[in-house]
Amino acid sequence: MSLVIGVDLGGTKTAAGLVAADGTVIRRVSAPTPAAKGPAAVLQTIVDLATRLTESAAGAPLAGCGIGAAGVIDPVSRTVQFATNSLPGWTGTRLGAEIEDRLGLPVATVNDVHAHALGEAVHGAGRGERTVLVLAAGTGIGGALVIDGVLQSGRHGAAGHYGHLPAAEAAGLACTCGGTGHLEVIASGPAILDAYLRHGGSPVRNTQEIFARADAGDTLAAEIIDVAASALGRALGGLINSVDPDIVIVGGGLAAAGPRWWTVMESHARAEALGLLAGCHIVPTRLGADSAIVGAASLLAAPAVARLSS
């Protein structure tokens, strides 16, 4: 049985797994991402984890290594086109070529959110569906469209930046991308925290505390959460109208925050969707923390990624 190494590279943690053809993760390893030490240290962490998995494969053939990494990753050149300061110096890293040279295995690369989406579409909640729309809502907001098991990455590998759709509730608010009025600055986890404090809420340590306060009767906390969830829901309804998917899979920290957020988000998505599409299946993710590892491993199946031609 041929196995694949799947890697989920984030700004704080790098996880990897030995994945079978049916998406089963046989073994998992992880390590902190040494982001502050620069790209060379990050690449070495990937190699070290992959080597541990190779040794545990007990001689089983390895088809290659798939990597889902933070940043905009060109799936053809396998180079990091853009990355935030969470990974200093990461932009320009020849991710695919560097790891391929060190491991001596074929390497395929994609953005980490795209890897999550591919995992859910191929082996998770979207398995068996033709057109799968995935939305991840947490620290940021992103997602992907997967058709017949093939990720639609866009010309530059940047498709799925749904957090940078315009949102009326975010008018005038600065976005981390340099623009203003984007969905992410009103509907993400950090945006909920910022809005709560901006509107006079007493100090809190994190977004989870705001949800707890809402459940305990804090009306401001409830209002802030409802605004974020409704804005995201309307954006999702617009995406449903433009794509007409077989299924929508919603994941990320906010999707797991409880029924308050989910109920408001889903109701506004259905209200925004065209009547014919209002019954579209909207479901949570199924693979959990394994989704990006499984999705990255599935990159070794051909074709796994479609890119618009230049």
Image (cartoon, rainbow, N blue to C red):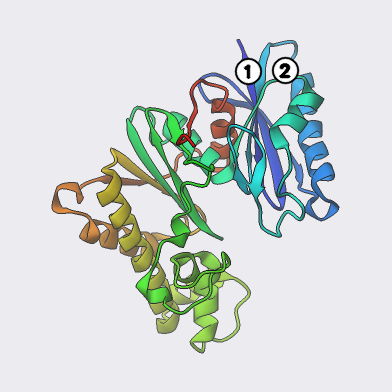
The residue depicted at 63 percent of the width and 33 percent of the height is 77
Left or right: where 52 falls relative to 140? right
User: Which mark is on residue 12?
Assistant: none
Please rate how many residues cluster around mark 1, counting C-alpha atoms within 10 Å: few if below 14, some from 14 to 19, many from 20: many
Say what secondary structure mark 2 lies in: loop
Query: Quick check: 72 above or below 194?
Result: above
**Residue 174 visible, this angle:** yes
Left or right: where 32 falls relative to 296? right
Q: Disc 1 or 2, which lies upstream in sequence?
A: 1
User: Foreground mark, 1 or 2?
Assistant: 1
Q: Position of residue 304 (x, y in %)?
A: 49, 27
Residue designated by label 1: 3
Please rate how many residues cluster around mark 2, counting C-alpha atoms within 10 Å: few if below 14, some from 14 to 19, many from 20: some
Q: Position of residue 92 (x, y in %)?
A: 72, 45
- Asked if disc 1 and disc 2 are in contact, CB closer than 8 Å, the reply is yes
Label 1 amino acid?
A: Leu
Left or right: where 52 falls relative to 115? right
Q: Position of residue 91 (x, y in %)?
A: 70, 49
Quadrant occupied by the N terminus: top right
Query: Quick check: 274 above or below 231?
Result: above
Left or right: where 81 falls relative to 250? right
Marks 1 and 2 sit apart, C-alpha to C-alpha, by 8 Å
Label 2 amino acid?
A: Ala
Query: Quick check: 163 above or below 297?
Result: below
The residue depicted at 80 percent of the width and 46 percent of the height is 39
The residue depicted at 47 percent of the width and 55 percent of the height is 256
The quarter of the displayed image where residue 31 is located: top right
Residue designated by label 2: 57
Query: Quick check: 80 above or below 229?
Result: above
Q: Position of residue 78 (x, y in %)?
A: 65, 34
Of residues 193 and 155, the one drawn nearer to the viewer in this rendering? 155
